[in-house]
Image (cartoon, rainbow, N blue to C red):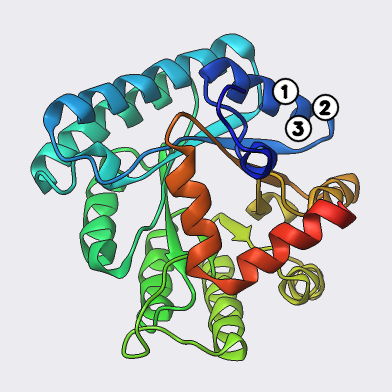
């Protein structure tokens, strides 16, 4: 794994495409699907954007060749959002069209709040053309997200619901975990009742148990949702859910830009440090 640190090696699949594919193969053997993420964000010039787009097109082709169970996740700032929305949209159309050729799927990650509105606008443009090829992420700690969930439910758009990994001010984001969990549950209910396919992206045991209980009580088909966890975290729990017949997907990052990814995960929210340390000794 080259220069990957000991800690990063646990949570980043590697620096190369081959290492990413191999990590997914191992997950698939354990009944867990994946979404592969080529690490990188906030690209500032078109040359870097084109290189990032080419890496995703090659990744989609490699997934097809390897016949592994994985889709892909990416960030719009990696695809030129800071350069211009129209430019980014053109790049994304190429990538999603490639995914569709391979019967695959592109998940647009949500970034910091400065990008939320633009990300949702661009997603809806793509979704109108590729309704089976692209999905979005909503973060339950943002005050706006319950309303965004209602809008996505009306579209029956595929949504990954997460708590949120960026540090945001109290004016726009809940800081108390009880509020974040309440928002999370509300969003999941709205989306599932609206017919969206929902990615339950959390390591929070309270939320995991609530989803199992609530979907069972409401007779929500298991095909309508899946549990999603970060690579290297709660591996035993992921396998347990998969063995119980739930769809489970691991978010698998790889690439040379692993240091900013790893540092941000630890810096932004203190609970990430707790999960990292706990997982090293219990999972």
Q: Is residue 197 above or below residue 45?
A: below
Q: Is residue 158 above or below residue 9?
A: below
Does the rendering let one see residue 164? Answer: no
Name the residue rendered at 46%, 87% in the picture.
Answer: 174
Q: Which residue is mark 2?
A: 29
Camera-side residue of 79 and 70: 79
Q: Quadrant of residue 89?
A: top left
Q: Which residue is mark 1?
A: 25
Name the residue rendered at 70%, 68% in the picture.
Answer: 274
Q: Are marks 1 and 3 in contact (CB under 8 Å)?
A: yes
Is the residue marked by circle 3 packed among few (<14), some (14-19), or many (20+) residues within 10 Å? many
> Which SS class for mark 2?
helix
Is the residue marked by circle 1 packed among few (<14), some (14-19), or many (20+) residues within 10 Å? many
Camera-side residue of 225 and 262: 262
Does the rendering let one see residue 194? Answer: yes
| Residue 130 in the image, given as x and y percentages of width and height | 33, 38
Q: Which residue is mark 3?
A: 27
Q: Are marks 1 and 2 in contact (CB under 8 Å)?
A: yes
Q: Is residue 266 above or below residue 261?
A: below
Left or right of 76: which side holds 28? right
Q: Residue furthest top?
A: 65
| Quadrant placement of the N terminus | top right
| Residue 235 in the image, given as x and y percentages of width and height | 80, 48
Q: Are marks 3 and 2 in contact (CB under 8 Å)?
A: yes
> Which SS class for mark 3?
helix
> Which SS class for mark 1?
helix
Name the residue rendered at 48%, 67% in the picture.
Answer: 268
Report the disc number at residue 159: none
Between the residue at mark 3 and the residue at mark 2, the CA separation in whole angstroms equals 5 Å
Left or right of 100: which side holds 211? right
């Amino acid at each position: 794994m080259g220069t990957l640190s000991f800690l990063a090696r646990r949570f980043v699949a590697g620096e190369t495409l081959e290492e990413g594919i191999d990590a997914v193969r191992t997950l698939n053997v354990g009944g867990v699907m994946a979404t592969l993420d080529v690490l990188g964000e906030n690209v500032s010039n078109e040359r870097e954007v084109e290189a990032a787009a080419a890496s995703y097109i090659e990744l989609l082709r490699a997934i097809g060749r390897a016949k592994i169970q994985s889709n892909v996740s990416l960030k719009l700032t990696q695809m030129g959002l800071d350069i211009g929305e129209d430019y980014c949209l053109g790049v994304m159309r190429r990538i999603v069209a490639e995914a569709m050729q391979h019967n695959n799927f592109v998940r647009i990650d949500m970034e910091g709040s400065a990008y939320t509105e633009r990300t949702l606008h661009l997603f809806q443009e793509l979704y109108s053309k590729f309704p089976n090829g692209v999905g979005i992420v909503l973060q339950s700690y943002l005050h706006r997200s319950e309303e965004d969930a209602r809008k996505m439910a009306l579209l029956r758009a595929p949504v990954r619901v997460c708590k949120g990994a960026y540090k945001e001010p109290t004016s726009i984001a809940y800081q108390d975990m009880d509020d974040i969990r309440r928002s999370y549950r509300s969003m999941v209910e709205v989306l599932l009742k609206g017919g969206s396919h929902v990615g339950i992206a959390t390591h929070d045991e309270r939320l995991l148990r609530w989803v199992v209980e609530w979907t069972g009580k409401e007779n929500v088909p298991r095909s309508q949702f899946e549990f999603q966890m970060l690579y290297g975290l709660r591996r035993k729990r992921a396998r347990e859910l998969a063995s119980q017949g739930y769809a489970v997907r691991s978010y698998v990052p790889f690439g040379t830009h692993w240091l900013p990814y790893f540092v941000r995960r630890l810096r932004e929210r203190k609970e990430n440090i707790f999960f990292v340390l706990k997982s090293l000794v219990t999972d």
